[in-house]
């Protein structure tokens, strides 16, 4: 499928955002500035309440929307996207859920491959302080009562506090 030329500066970024951290935010700032519109796809939207996927799509939506507001990014669309266990139709699935886009930002090999095969322009984005800025590290610190707050925007910490996210993860850790 060919991307529509009218949307040549519209971008897509997909992640699980479990939770959104400063690494994601840096990428979003960059993409937002380079784009007319930026669609943020919340991947694996159907999962929640596990140690690796603790937050619902709705909770992640709030984290992203409130952060965009907090930092003044006003060209973001947020779209929850459930997994499909059939990769050959996954791109069509994403397209069906998203506003139009023609550029895909991803560092994930499979995502890049699938969109490339579908005729999309793929861009990679640099990793910022990946040692600390990763969802896995944020969740690890939540589990061991570490300093996770310094890794996420204030708006994200507020949502996590609202829903007792730390209590939720702590209650799930024996399920791993
Ligand atoms: P997890 O550890 O749970 O996999 P993650 O930090 O890798 O979380 P994802 O939601 O899996 O976050 O990633 C979404 C996208 O964000 C990926 O394409 C990834 O390249 C990008 N990303 C993740 N961390 C950073 C970072 N520190 N700097 C820049 N981009 C990042
Ligand atoms: Mg990841």
Image: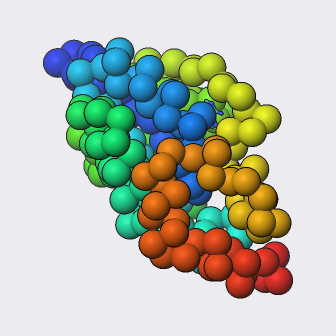
**Residue 52 placement (x, y as % from top left):** 69, 64
Depth order, front residue of 24/22? 22
- Vertical placement of 16 versus 25: above or below? below
Residue at 49%, 35% in the rendered image: 25
The structure residue drawn at horizontal position 68% and vertical position 39%, both measured from the top left corner, is: 133
Q: Position of residue 26 (x, y in %)?
A: 52, 28
Q: Quadrant of residue 172?
A: bottom right
Residue 167 coordinates in the image, percent (x, y): 64, 79
Residue 75 left/right relative to 59: left
Residue 116: x, y in percent?
51, 25
Residue 42 visible in the displayed image: no
Compared with 86, 168 (above or below) is below
Q: Residue furthest left?
A: 6
The residue closer to the viewer here, 18 or 156, is 156
Question: Residue at left 29%, top 43%?
Answer: 69
> In screen coordinates, is 125 left or right of 45?
right
Residue 61 sits in which quadrant? bottom left
């Amino acid at each position: 499928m060919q991307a529509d030329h009218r949307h040549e500066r519209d971008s897509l970024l997909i992640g699980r955002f479990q939770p959104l951290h400063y690494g994601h935010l840096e990428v979003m700032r960059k993409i937002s500035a380079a784009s007319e519109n930026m669609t943020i796809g919340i991947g694996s939207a159907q999962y929640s309440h596990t140690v690796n996927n603790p937050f619902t799509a709705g909770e992640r939506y709030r984290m992203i929307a409130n952060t965009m507001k907090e930092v003044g990014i006003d060209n973001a669309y947020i779209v929850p996207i459930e997994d499909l266990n059939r990769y050959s139709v996954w791109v069509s699935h994403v397209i069906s859920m998203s506003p139009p886009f023609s550029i895909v930002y991803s560092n994930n090999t499979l995502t890049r491959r699938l969109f490339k095969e579908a005729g999309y322009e793929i861009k990679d984005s640099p990793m910022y302080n990946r040692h600390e800025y990763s969802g896995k590290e944020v969740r690890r610190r939540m589990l061991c009562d570490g300093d996770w707050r310094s890794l996420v925007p204030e708006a994200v910490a507020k949502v996590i506090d609202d829903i007792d996210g730390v209590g939720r993860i702590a209650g799930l850790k024996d399920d791993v």
